Image: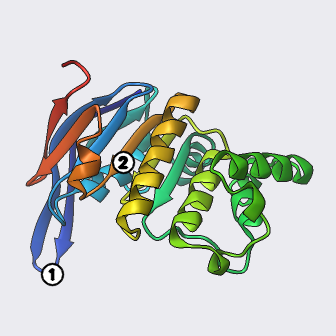
Amino acid sequence: MYQLTGVTKRYSRGKDTVHALTGVDLTIEDGDRLVIQGPTGGGKSTLLQMLGGLDRPSSGSVELDGVDLARLSEAKLTRVRSQNIGFVFQSFNLIPTLTAQENVETALVPLGVKASVRRERAAEALESVGLGERRGHLPGEMSGGQQQRVAIARALVKQPKVLLADEPTGNLDESMRDDIVDLLEGLWKEHGLTFVMVTHDSAIARRAPRLATIKKGRVTITDRSAA
């Protein structure tokens, strides 16, 4: 479970101070599916980075299972990310010279998983996203939707507790967008993940049981699951 208390994030931009987040209090239960929406530059990605331990708040606490990520050393924070949190980004972030199989395996290297097990788990992860027959293909030999599926497999192969997605359909057309969202929702249910996604797409936001809307650094929650 995530518990955010009084989370504030300030950036200096020249002589100005930008308040990306202002006193955010937020609880995300285990197994929740939460979509974060708001205007460009309004703090959506900043909030997701806090949840993933990729950034630290200027003040406040970001607790995951009772551990304040903001107070961990970089080494311990890296370990938490490697073991417990899967990331999916808009730009896929695949290594162009590695095959789909090899890209997925890279997530297991920091965990010390031996090579034979890495190969087996990566193959299973690619199968789960419908790319079992494309294991030997390079990213440049796949469509944008297929590359995002590889990125999703890479995020899930380490069997994380949390999946964080930052505009995962931003580079895809409408039909691919729907396929990827369907896939992510199916994997969320299948694996019992805590799933948090940032999107500017209102069609995606309407599908979420919980919606966090950020405006001027403040978060408002709409809970449709209780309806």
Task: Tell me if 82 is positioned left or right of 71 in this view.
Answer: right
SS assignment at label 2: strand
Q: Residues within 10 Å of mark 1 (few under 14, many from 20)?
A: few
Residue position marked by numbered label 1 in the rendering: 14
Residue 221 location, x and y as percent?
Answer: 17, 34
Q: Residue at x 88, y 49 (%)?
A: 114
Task: Tell me if 135 is positioned left or right of 95 in this view.
Answer: right
Whole-angstrom CA distance, mark 1 to mark 2, is 30 Å
Asked whether the viewer can see residue 57, the reply is no
Q: Looking at the image, is mark 1 or mark 2 earlier in the sequence?
A: 1
SS assignment at label 1: loop
Residue 73 location, x and y as percent?
Answer: 51, 49
Task: Tell me if 143 is positioned left or right of 41 in this view.
Answer: right
Q: Residue at x 75, y 71 (%)?
A: 99
Q: Residue at x 70, y 53 (%)?
A: 126
Residue 225 location, x and y as percent?
Answer: 26, 23
Badge 1 amino acid: Gly
Task: Tell me if 125 is positioned left or right of 187 in this view.
Answer: right
Question: What scheme was used to colour the molecule?
Answer: rainbow
**Quarter that holds the N terminus:** top left
Q: Residue farthest to the front?
A: 175
Q: Residue at x 80, y 49 (%)?
A: 112
Badge 2 amino acid: Met
The one nearer the camera, 128 or 200, is 128
The one nearer the camera, 152 or 17, is 152
Residue 17 location, x and y as percent?
Answer: 12, 68
Asked whether the viewer can see residue 91, the reply is yes
Q: How many marks?
A: 2
Residue position marked by numbered label 2 in the rendering: 197
The one nearer the camera, 130 or 34, is 130
Say which mark, if any, is on residue 219.
none
